[in-house]
Amino acid sequence: MSNYSENEVKEMLEVYTANPCRESVNELAEKMGRSVKSIIGKLSREGVYRREKYLTKTGENPVTKVEILEEIAEKLDLDVTKLSGLEKAPKPVLKLLAERVGLS
């Protein structure tokens, strides 16, 4: 049972677009006897699924070490490869460095 009927798709779109959250996805999965991944996949193919943004424990948007290094390199007018090895530094150290070069 991998294909969805037109009625199922219509219902999915109505339910999800009215309340685009994980709870709606869970409700649809249970009601239709499908996995959450299947529902998310179909909603994605229909172009309506929006991935939930997650925040760090401190309430900030997540930023990778590589992104921090790219910002530092740009600020210092360096090729990011010149900072090779710093990606292994602890994230708080990279954040401090970014702050000291005038970022954030």
Image: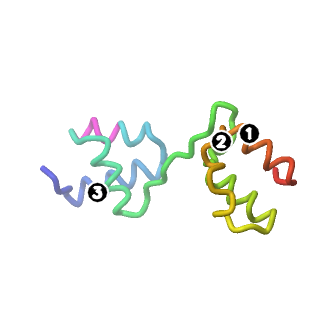
Identify which residue is drawn at 72% across, 37% down.
92
Residue 41 location (% of width, % of height): 32, 54
The numbered mark, 1 or 3, whose residue comes first in the sequence reads 3
For mark 1, what is the residue?
93
Label 1 residue SS = helix
Extent of the magenta region: 27-32
> For the residue carrying disc 1, how many other residues have a C-alpha within 10 Å: few (<14), some (14-19), or many (20+)?
few
Left or right: 11 with respect to 86?
left
**Disc 1 or disc 3, which is closer to the eye?**
1
For mark 2, what is the residue?
89
Would you place residue 60 above or below residue 50 in this image? above
Q: Which amino acid does label 3 sit on?
A: Val
- Residue 30 is inside the magenta segment: yes
Q: What residue type is labelled 2?
A: Ala
Q: In which quarter of the image is residue 47?
A: bottom left
How far separated are the C-alphas under marks 1 and 2? 7 Å
For mark 3, what is the residue?
9
Mark 1 near mark 2, Cβ–Cβ under 8 Å? Answer: yes
